[in-house]
Image: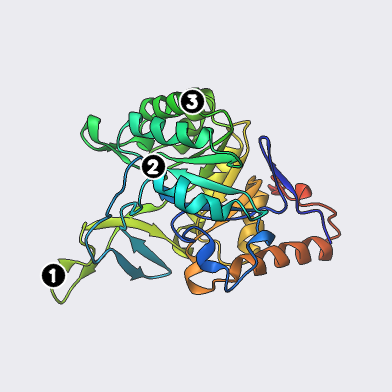
Amino acid sequence: MADLTTQLHRLSLRNPVMTASGTFGYGEEFTDFIDLNHLGAIIVKGTTATSREGNPYPRMAETASGMLNAVGLQNKGIDHFIHEIWPRLKQFKTPFIVNVSGSTIEEYIETAEKLDSLEGMPAIELNISCPNVKEGGMTFGTSCLAAASVTKAVRKVFHKTLIVKLSPNVTDITEIAKAVEGEGADAVSLINTLLGMAIDAQSRKPILSTITGGLSGPAIKPIALRMVWQVYHTVKIPVIGIGGIMNAMDAIEFLLAGAVAVQVGTANFIDPAVTLKIIEGINDYCEQNNLSSIKDLIGALIIPE
């Protein structure tokens, strides 16, 4: 057995395989299929300061080699999570990380502050791919200034491991990564979904109620790999790779590009046990290639001269 442990700032993971927010519920929904204690970490669904209903249906659409979603952060709010859900989740050995979302910086602060005092909660993932309602709806994560501002504000109230999830819908993702690193992010995760659209040619109408939505799945993997590689060579903090990971080889590609861990998202809808298969596949790859640790893979991409 190879050493699959990896480090996210102060947070130690037993292996590099995490689940992506919004694709794994609160984790409990998958206990009939896998032992959650075997995972590296679980990122629970996007959580906001207050309850949200989400967007009207239809809010999901299948696309070539992927899917579009416009669920809209449907959740019952942070207080419900703390009092009703967390008491059950904290019984597991695997770290649970809350994906924190908001419409204003004040909302992010409120949610992060409550999680900072929550015993056993080791980290949060800051979802900055949310519209800033005070700035005309522009997404926090598409501007260096806005991304830095929300990271700085949350850093002041959250003293555990702070992961910032980056949007790919930008001109230069390395600039955003540097901005959040400069304001105290302990790690970055990337990429979030790409903005996409689906049209029904028969009705001549958009398929999603919101017209546009977030594209995920294998279609986005080449873009995600490129961005992870670029960010790895730009910042000094750990990078978590996300985007179209369907099997162990996909995950290994992200490690080679510089990720210390990966998040599996869309693949969970196809095979609820895929995460355990990916962990096993990474171990097999290490053993077949005489690697004692996955640390020998991280950033080990060979660039021909």
Earlier along the polypeptide chain: callout 1 or callout 2? Answer: 2
What residue do we see at 22% from left, 67% from top?
A: 207
Q: Secondary structure at mark 3?
A: helix
Q: Secondary structure at mark 2?
A: loop
Residue position marked by numbered label 2 in the rendering: 101
Coordinates of residue 116 in the picture (x, y in percent): 52, 33
Instruction: Between residue 224 and residue 163, name the one nearer to us.
Output: 163
Q: Dot 2 surroundings within 10 Å: few (below 14), some, or many (20 or more)?
A: many
Amino acid at the residue labelled 3: Val
Residue position marked by numbered label 3 in the rendering: 157
Amino acid at the residue labelled 1: Arg
Q: Dot 1 surroundings within 10 Å: few (below 14), some, or many (20 or more)?
A: few
Quarter of the image for residue 64 reads bottom left
Marks 3 & 1, CB-CB < 8 Å contact:
no
Can residue 267 be seen here? Answer: no
What residue do we see at 70% from left, 42% from top?
A: 7
Mark 2 or mark 3, which is nearer to you? 3
Residue position marked by numbered label 1 in the rendering: 204
Can residue 107 be seen here? Answer: yes
Earlier along the polypeptide chain: callout 3 or callout 1? Answer: 3
Coordinates of residue 15 in the picture (x, y in percent): 71, 54
